[in-house]
Amino acid sequence: MKSVHTPIEVRYAETDQMGIVHHGSYVVWCEIGRTHHMKEMGFHYPDIEKAGYLFPVLGINIDYETPAVYGEDVEIETWIDSYDGVRVKYGYIVTNAKGETCIRAFSSHVCVRKETFKPVAIRRALPDWHEAYNRLAGTAAAGSAKGGGDDGVWH
């Protein structure tokens, strides 16, 4: 698995007065893509929380290209862009049914203990996740084929 594709039908509540998807809705879609990617890796995020760990967002960067509109079908492509043992960076591309890119995005996350919010090494806390992240980091065709670089610049 290099990347995961998640379909979304644009809902009315996700649009603004101009009839296009509100910029904040894309962040929610990235989360939907990320949790779908985790499931495809064989993991269920609520199980991680039950084990006492969280993956808060450190940062998110979104480049907006073509607006999505109400009633349109879009697809979120999600992949692991990079992983250093503590932080993981996901990449996302949302495209519409015409194949036009709506957004390109990255989000960075760190694994922390739920009770202290202190970062932990994923290889010790969640060895199965560590193995999966190492296997998948930077291997997605999406990141390189569509121009995404680790520097956050689209070439």
Image: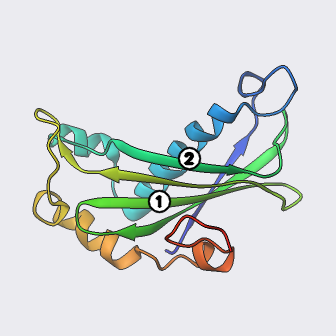
In which quadrant of the rendered view does residue 76 lie? bottom right
Residue that numbered label 1 is attached to:
90
The residue shown at (51%, 69%) is: 151
Residue 115, above or below 123: above
Question: Residue flagged by tag 1: what amino acid is it?
Answer: Tyr
Taking 41 as reference, is 9 left or right?
right
Taking 87 as reference, is 15 left or right?
right
Secondary structure category for the residue under label 2: helix
Residue 137: percent from left, percent from top: 40, 74
Quarter holding the C terminus?
Answer: bottom right
Circle 1 crowding by C-alpha within 10 Å: few under 14, some 14–19, many from 20: many
Q: CA distance from mark 1 to mark 2?
A: 9 Å
Residue 26: percent from left, percent from top: 64, 40
In which quadrant of the rendered view does residue 67 lie? top right
Question: Residue flagged by tag 2: what amino acid is it?
Answer: Cys
Residue 113: percent from left, percent from top: 14, 42
In the image, which disc is placed on residue 149? Answer: none
Taking 130 as reference, is 135 left or right?
right
Between disc 1 and disc 2, whose residue precedes? Answer: 2
- State yes or no: discs 1 and 2 in contact (Cβ < 8 Å): yes
Residue 122: percent from left, percent from top: 19, 60
The residue shown at (23%, 60%) is: 86
The residue shown at (56%, 73%) is: 149
Residue 73, above or below 151: above
Residue that numbered label 2 is attached to:
30
